[in-house]
Each structure stands twice: as C-alpha cells, then as structure tokens.
Image: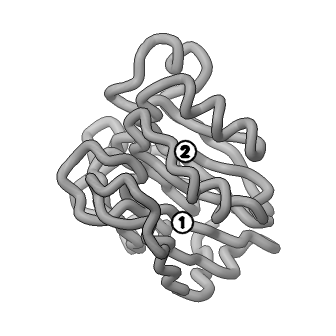
Amino acid sequence: MRIGIMADTHGFFDPQVAQHFAECDEIWHAGDFGTLRVAEQLSALKPLRGVFGNIDDQAIRDIYPEDLWFECCGVRIWMTHIAGHPGRYDRRVQQQLDRKSPQLLICGHSHILRVDRDKRHNGMLCLNPGATGHHGFHLLRTIMLADFADGQITALNIVELGPRGIRKPTEPNLIELGPWPITGD
C-alpha cells in the first residue's frame, strides 16, 4: 500500500502534490491544514486521514481529531500534530508513549523533515514530513511517500517540492531512503 504523507500546508494546496500522490492509495495529513478547502482538495484526490493542528479552526477540528490511532498493513500508527522527536517529546505525547507506544509515530508542527528511531520506545519510527505550505521558517517544502506491506515500510521517499515562498512550479527532487524495518511489538 502506497501512502502520501504531508503536514503543515497552512492553506496552500500545491498542484504538484496531485502528481506525486497519483499512485497513492491514501493521503495522511499530520495537521495544520490551514483551511477546510485544502482538506477537500486532498480528499478529492485519494482517501484522506488527518489530524488537526494548532492553527486549524473549528471546522477542521469538527472533522479531524487531535490523535489518530490506526493500523496499516500490520503497522500500528499514531498520528498527531505536535509530538516533538525522540528525546524531546511534547509532555502530552511523552505521557502517552509511556503508557502505549505505536510502531510508527507521524507528526508535523516543526516544519522540519525528520526520520528518527526511538530506542527508548522499542525502536519506534518517528516521521515528520516537513512542511508543504509556504508559511514558516523552513527552506524547502517537502512530502513523503511510504510503501507498507506485511508489517513493514518497504520504501520511504522524500519529495522536495521547491523552496518556501516561491510559488511557481520547480523541478521536484526525489530522495529514496529505501526500506525502514518496523520494530517493536
């Protein structure tokens, strides 16, 4: 199953996303849609799972939860907007992880693309796809493509959509990270 992962659109729908997510089975948005229109545009492309972020209004919060726990191809996943990263989790997230850890944690908020393992939580994989929108301090706008099968991420790719603040289409850069085995119970 191929998944398009993104966050922090902040009201901007990049037409390149439709091209890169064309072969995806679902789109996962880790919060800060910015507008309900962006969620509608994404859900018109593929089935959409998402969580609200700190800038999202009540219309988005009425549809998307703060936390989304689910399974994909045998991988236990938790998606939330504000999580932090291994060694620097948000207090609410750390308390939850101390009770129950997923195999994969997906978040946004920082606008910083990250792929980390958390050895303290059974090797949990932590993904932050960076930001797709133009608001913020990030230099590049990014999305992720992940292939799931048999309890594993069999391929993980980063797509660089172009610099923040430049709204004309640029040639995207695909970075192939390869398989990322899922560990833990």
Viewer-closest of 15 and 44: 15
Count up the numbered dots. 2
Q: Residue at x 75, y 56 (%)?
A: 72
Q: Is residue 127 visible?
A: no
Viewer-closest of 121 and 17: 17
How far apart are the two marked residues, 1 and 2, measured between alpha carbons? 11 Å
Provide residue 141's location: percent of width, then percent of height. Answer: 37, 60
Residue type of the residue flagged with mark 1: Met
Provide residue 117's location: percent of width, then percent of height. Answer: 41, 73
Q: Which quarter of the figure has residue 43?
A: top right
Disc number at residue 107? Answer: none
Viewer-closest of 85 and 176: 176
Viewer-closest of 57 and 44: 44
Is residue 147 left or right of 13 when viewed as pictured?
right
Q: Which quarter of the figure has residue 184?
A: bottom right
Is residue 47 left or right of 97 when viewed as pictured?
right
> For mark 1, does the 10 Å Cα neighbourhood hold few (<14), some (14 to 19), or many (20 or more) residues?
many
Q: Residue at x 31, y 47 (%)?
A: 134
> At numbered mark 1, what does the secondary structure look like: helix, strand or loop?
strand
Q: How is the image coloured?
A: one colour
The first of marks 1 and 2 along the sequence is 2
Residue type of the residue flagged with mark 2: His
Residue identified by numbered label 2: 29
Residue identified by numbered label 1: 144
Q: Which quarter of the figure has residue 5?
A: bottom right
Is residue 155 left or right of 120 when viewed as pictured?
right
Residue 58 position (above or below residue 40): above
